[in-house]
Image (cartoon, grey):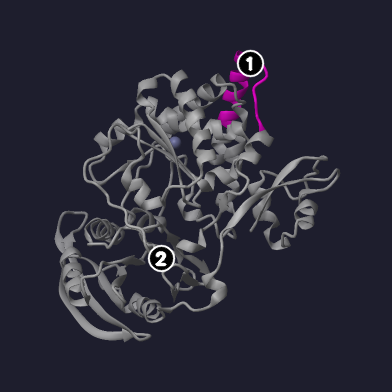
Amino acid sequence: MQPTLTAVVRTGLTLTLLLPLAGSRLAATETIAVPSPPPVQGAQPDPQVIAQFGLLDNAKLQAYIDQKGMQMGRISDRPADVKGFTVVDSPIINAFATPDGHVYFTRGILAYFNNEAQFSGVLGHEIGHITARHGQKQQTRSTAINGAILLGSIFSKRIASIAQPATQLASIGLLKYGRDDETESDQLGVKYSSKIGYDPASMADFFLTLSRTEQSSGAATVPTFLSSHPNSADRYTTVKKLAQQAEQQAGRQLAVNRDQYLRLIEGLPYGDNPREGYVENSVFYHPDLKFQFPVPEGWKSQNSPSQFQMAEPNGKAVQILLPAGNKGLDETAQALAQQLKLQNAQAQKTTVNNFPALVIQGDQVGQDQSGQQGVTASTLTYLIQDGQTIYALVGLCGPGTLGTYGSTFQRTAQGFRRLTDAAKLNKQPERVRIKTAKAGQTLAQALAANGISSKRYDELAILNGMKTTDKMTAGMLFKVVGK
Ligand SMILES: [Zn+2]
């Protein structure tokens, strides 16, 4: 990691944790209070995880993962350690476990599973991180990460270069596991999954899906920088072998349950939920809060309930939008300068498309990686007042690089304006829809017959775990996405 990135990351953590937010969720009405003591023993989801991702409101799916999770917890090596299961409202493809014994699935990963056995394999992998107590090991190894520690992410090698700032800026640190821990969890996933009656080879198939999502750059709904896992292909081979042994040991037919699973996810939101903000043609729109602004060309972006992050492709600069309370521009500016530990901060009154605003420029001071006190980042921040709400657009880059990135930060902030376009305001999420194939159709033909644009065939082939040229049988279920 570059020292400058560390600085940026640290800043982000500080900012995220300390800025007096008017409710931590970037939504019109909701306020989530984050209590300071951790929840009891992981039976309930961690409030910090929920603040970052949001809960998925889907009783049927929640009941399903509760049931399978408890069933698997009971046959695991440490039943008492496995506490709870939650589906979070994020389009990112991921699953993770926290050291308190709670397992999380994103709706993103649930959309990509194609049968119960794939789900079960990943469930087993996450439960494996808990029962092998990888989290406890990680906690003692790492002291740098504040807040909840998410561990056992299905993507062990999460982030390289660019992804670092964008992800770690979030209030929750994501731990990277070593290869040994991941391998052990894969083994336990095979063991637990076959023990509750599912074909563990399907878990291997899911690694192929992961590897395809990593390679596809076009799928806007899959932030590939968050899901980088270069080892998926290797894991496929290893897990396939383990699965063969497990199948022989089981001595019975293990279940895959494709149709059951697909019917379960009918109607699941797919991709970003536009009500909470979305990017289209390099513009970020927030229909509920009724504003829009441009995203720098070529930058990666990630939306979460509490903030919207944009990152320069090489990780050299980030710009983050977050709500900054309702205390007035001057008071917010002072708080911000303090929390960012700015020196020589200068604030200037301005307006941004008729919104009152303040521009704050300054150098952030702190300790660099070698422990020296000095400038760790440069910042150009806009505070924009919309009625009672103040939005902060915080631009951060390496010391002395404001000359390079300042104009980009400015363009974004000065493009902030009221969203009035009805089509953008009324945009609804896409949903997974389950359709039935006719005999002899290829997947591409079946997609075409359901009005899917040919531009999306590859994306939907990955979603279905198939190739566009695969032949379907009569009555075979498959996924499309639509309203
Ligand atoms: Zn893992």
10 or 402: nearer the viewer: 10
Residue drawn at x 65%, y 34% as measured from the top left: 260
The answer to which quarter of the image holds residue 17 is bottom left
Check the image and name the residue furthest to the right.
Answer: 440
Q: Is residue 132 visible?
A: no
Q: Amino acid at mark 1?
A: Gln
Residue 273 rendering spot, x and y as whole percentages: 51, 58
Q: Main secondary structure of the magenta part?
A: helix
Residue that carries the numbered disc 2 in the rendered image: 310
Residue 248's label in the rendered image is 1
Residue drawn at x 46%, y 52% as measured from the top left: 226
- Mark 2 is surrounded, within 10 Å at the Cα level, by few (under 14), some (14 to 19) or many (20 or more) other residues, namely many
Ligand 1 near label 1 (Cβ, under 8 Å)?
A: no
How many numbered circles does the render carry? 2
Residue drawn at x 21%, y 58% as measured from the top left: 18
- Kind of element beneath mark 1: helix
Residue drawn at x 86%, y 44% as measured from the top left: 440
407 or 394: nearer the viewer: 394
Q: Find the magenta span and give its range.
A: 237-257
- Kind of element beneath mark 2: strand
Return the disc, 1 or 2, that comes first in the chain's sequence.
Answer: 1
